[in-house]
Image: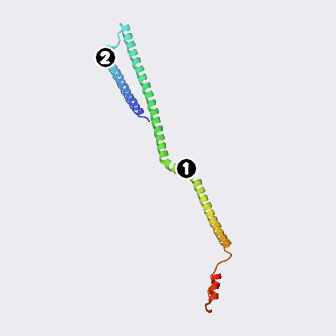
Amino acid sequence: MSQTDTPNIQALSTEVSQLRQELQLRDQLVQQLSQELFRLVKGNTNFMPQRAEPEYDSSQLQALQEQLQAVEQQVTFYQEQITTRDTEIYQLRQSVQELTDRSRMLEQVVQELPQIYRRKFEERMAPVREKVAMLQRENRKLQAELQSVSYRLAIKTRTASHSGIDLPNFARPDAVPNQNNISTVQNA
């Protein structure tokens, strides 16, 4: 609900209450006039119309009927205005209720947004994580193969450069060292 609607509602409410007060005041005046007229007619026997002046009485009666009709028209007009204002007030209350409900719904949505974003982010990250895990497994596999190939290559290059393993010839402990043994070790 906008800020301009609140003063409108208040102004309409104030105007409706003023119209009701005016209507009540007019109703009271009509009631008082009718009671006063009844009291005058009942208590005053001289009030009975004289047959000599029928034109005067009929003109007075006509004026009173016109006044009564004018008052009835005003009452009808005010009742229609009150009904119209009541309808407007009802519609405004409906609008206020709908806007209140909508604002509550929006507040709830705003409160749920972080969870929604987290869930969407997790949904988008799941394939990325799977791909990273797959690439890590493949990387470990390739590193293991590389180590295996490097090891085999190292062994192959070692055996290709040497025809055999060079082991030193050590003298026998029971034999006396002589020149032959030393030369054997050097020749080897």
Q: Amino acid at mark 1?
A: Lys
Residue at 38 percent across and 7 percent down: it is: 55
Where is residue 133? Give x, y as percent. Answer: 59, 59
Locate residue 119, reporting x and y percent.
Answer: 54, 51
Residue for point 38% across, 28% down = 15
In the image, 56 versus 46, the foreground residue is 56
Q: Is residue 84 left or right of residue 172?
A: left
Among the two numbered marks 2 and 1 on one chain, the one whose residue lies closer to the N terminus: 2
Total marks in image: 2
Disc sitting over residue 164 in the figure: none
Residue 18 can be seen in this image:
yes
Q: Pointer 1: what residue?
A: 120
Q: CA distance from mark 2 to mark 1?
A: 93 Å
State whether residue 44 is above or below residue 4: above
Q: Residue at x 52, y 49 (%)?
A: 117
Identify residue for label 2.
44
Q: Residues within 10 Å of mark 1 (few under 14, many from 20)?
A: few
